[in-house]
Amino acid sequence: MLNLAVLLEHTARELPDRDAVVQGGTRLPYAQVDAAANRVAAALTAHGIGPGDRVALSCPNLPRTGVS
């Protein structure tokens, strides 16, 4: 199934250093964005969320959200 997660993972594999997010002076490469998405997924899994579950996230629309 082609979705945003699949596209992100593919691009992170193929072009890990290419900019995925640019805001002002902040630049985040695909590899870093993919790693952040994986941390969010792991945290959800740790709380018992699984495939098919529906989750609402409320996050500011900022590059640092989910990125350490």
Image (cartoon, grey):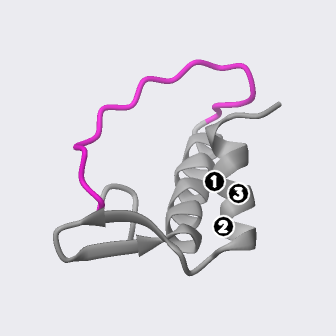
The span picked out in magenta is: 48-64
Asked whether the beta carbons under mark 2 and mark 3 sit within 8 Å of each other, the answer is yes
Residue 57 part of the magenta-drawn span: yes
Tag 2, which secondary structure?
helix
To which residue does mark 2 refer?
12
The reply, left or right, for residue 41 in relation to residue 55 is right
- Specify the amino acid type for callout 1: Leu
Residue 51 part of the magenta-drawn span: yes
Q: Against 57, is 61 above or below?
A: below
Furthest toward the bottom, the residue is 17
Specify the quadrant of the image occupied by residue 44.
top right
To which residue does mark 3 refer?
9
- Specify the amino acid type for callout 2: Ala
Tag 1, which secondary structure?
helix
* Prevailing secondary structure of the magenta residues: loop
Asked whether the beta carbons under mark 1 and mark 2 sit within 8 Å of each other, the answer is yes
Furthest toward the right, the residue is 1
